[in-house]
């Protein structure tokens, strides 16, 4: 593929059309998101595309690619000619929860270099807003009261990042730049970490890592090993009153354990951006808890144009008999 093809999805589509009598058919599927927000980007990228958005998908045997976030269980298996299952994000755990996920289509993730900036901004905000008592200041301002809170230097506030992938390392650099003491934990050793970041790995290093976290940021991938990682046992190993920030996946967190830990003082606060059930139900106790900040899974969101471009590029490669570099193993989760 030429550079022009990589940078211009419409060019990619026209090349695909040379080998078929009709344009490719792409379905936008989710049981939790309104996928209409992607339609303009796909229309702009490939005007001739046969684009379908649920619930009326037409003939399922027309569909070549499905762009998904938590698609309805069993729907992908009903598409006999499906070649590509494209995740909306870097993770595919929302696909592996489908017991009928077909083994034939290639599963691809999104690689978004711009996502590091948005995630870093969110994580830095989450740490600062709690460490500098911004919630108390907002409450004082609403009451018309001039009331100072204790000021603790960032260097005395230890931030631990569980998960040292691209997003974790970018967050570590940003927090260091503000002056926070940063440590990181990963399942296996990591090389080329930012200078000054204390590194821990494996189960043998977990206790020492947790003992020095006044704030804990979860940026782990969701696998069978990390599901339920944020639980009562882990909370008990943090300094009392620590701040939990979950920007990973909702299934990392045992929700009942978090509520108990906040109520008995084991944890002092939680900032949550990912949940087991999304949208978070209106009656969920997280909404009303005074020590929990809820945001609607907005820590990092890929631009629709990037999703359209990568989907069409991946489909073009598959039609040429090539395996996309961003293809993943559903059994491994990455």
Image: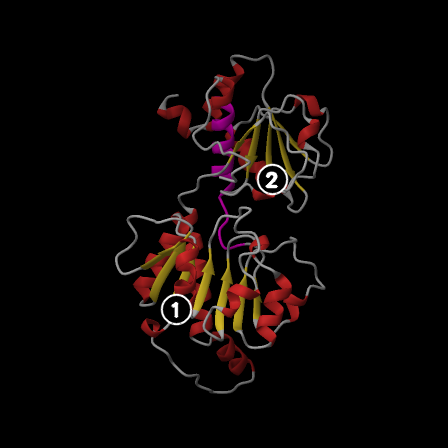
Between 116 and 42, the one lying in front of the other is 116
- Seen in the image, is 65 located left or right of residue 156? right
Could you tell me how many numbered marks the image carries?
Answer: 2
How crowded pointer 2 is (Cα within 10 Å; few <14, some 14-19, many 20+) is rated as: some
Along the viewing direction, whichever of 28 and 150 lies nearer the viewer: 150
Q: Is residue 245 left or right of residue 49?
A: left
Q: Nearer the viewer, residue 306 or 155?
A: 155
Q: Position of residue 91 (x, y in %)?
A: 52, 43
Residue at image mark 2:
96
Q: Residue at x 59, y 25 (%)?
A: 104
* Magenta region: 298-316
Q: Is there CB contact under 8 Å for labels 2 and 1? A: no
Kindly report the distance in space between the C-alpha atoms of the residues bearing marks 2 and 1: 34 Å
Residue 5: where, in percent of width, then height?
A: 41, 24
Number of other residues with Cα within 10 Å of mark 1, as a class: few under 14, some 14 to 19, many 20 or more: many
Examine the rendered structure and indicate whether residue 104 appears above or below residue 204.
above
Question: In the rendering, at what x and y percent does residue 229 appear?
Answer: 53, 57
As helix, strand or loop, the secondary structure at mark 1 comes to: loop
In percent of the image, x 53 and y 46: which residue is there? 223
Which is more foreground, mark 2 or mark 1? Answer: 1
Q: Residue furthest left?
A: 195
Q: Nearer the viewer, residue 137 or 69?
A: 69
Task: Tell me which corner region of the image, top left, top right, bottom left or bottom right, holds residue 54.
Answer: top right
Residue where numbered disc 1 is placed: 212
Is 228 contained in the magenta span?
no
Q: Main secondary structure of the magenta part?
A: helix
Q: Position of residue 190 (x, y in %)?
A: 34, 49
User: The N terminus appears in which quarter of the rendering?
Assistant: top left
Q: Which mark is residue 78?
A: none
């Amino acid at each position: 593929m030429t550079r022009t093809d990589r940078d211009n999805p419409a060019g990619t589509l026209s090349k695909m059309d040379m080998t078929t009598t009709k344009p490719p058919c792409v379905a936008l599927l989710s049981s939790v998101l309104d996928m209409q927000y992607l339609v303009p980007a796909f229309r702009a990228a490939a005007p001739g595309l046969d684009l379908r958005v649920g619930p009326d998908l037409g003939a399922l045997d027309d569909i070549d690619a499905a762009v998904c976030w938590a698609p309805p269980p069993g729907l992908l298996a009903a598409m006999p000619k499906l070649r590509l299952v494209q995740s909306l994000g870097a993770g595919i755990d929302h696909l592996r929860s489908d017991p009928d996920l077909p083994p034939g289509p290639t599963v691809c993730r999104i690689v978004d270099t711009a996502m590091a900036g948005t995630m870093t901004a969110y994580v830095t905000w989450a740490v600062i807003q709690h460490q500098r008592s911004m919630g108390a200041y907002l409450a004082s301002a609403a009451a018309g009261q001039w009331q100072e809170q204790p000021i603790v230097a960032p260097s005395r506030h230890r931030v631990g990042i569980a998960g040292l992938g691209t997003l974790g390392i970018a967050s570590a650099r940003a927090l260091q730049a503000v002056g926070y003491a940063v440590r990181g934990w990963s399942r296996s050793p990591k090389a080329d970490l930012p200078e000054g970041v204390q590194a821990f790995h494996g189960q043998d290093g977990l206790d020492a890592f947790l003992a020095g976290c006044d704030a804990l940021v979860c940026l782990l991938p969701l696998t069978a090993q990390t599901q339920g990682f944020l639980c009562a046992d882990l909370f008990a190993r943090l300094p009392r009153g620590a701040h939990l920030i979950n920007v990973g996946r909702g299934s990392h967190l045992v929700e009942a354990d978090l509520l108990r830990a906040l109520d008995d003082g084991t944890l002092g606060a939680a900032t949550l951006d990912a949940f087991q059930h999304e949208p978070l139900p209106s009656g969920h106790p997280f909404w009303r808890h005074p020590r929990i900040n809820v945001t609607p899974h907005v820590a990092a969101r890929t631009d629709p144009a990037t999703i359209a471009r990568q989907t069409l590029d991946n489909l073009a490669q598959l039609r040429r008999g090539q395996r996309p570099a961003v293809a993943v193993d559903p059994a491994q989760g990455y």
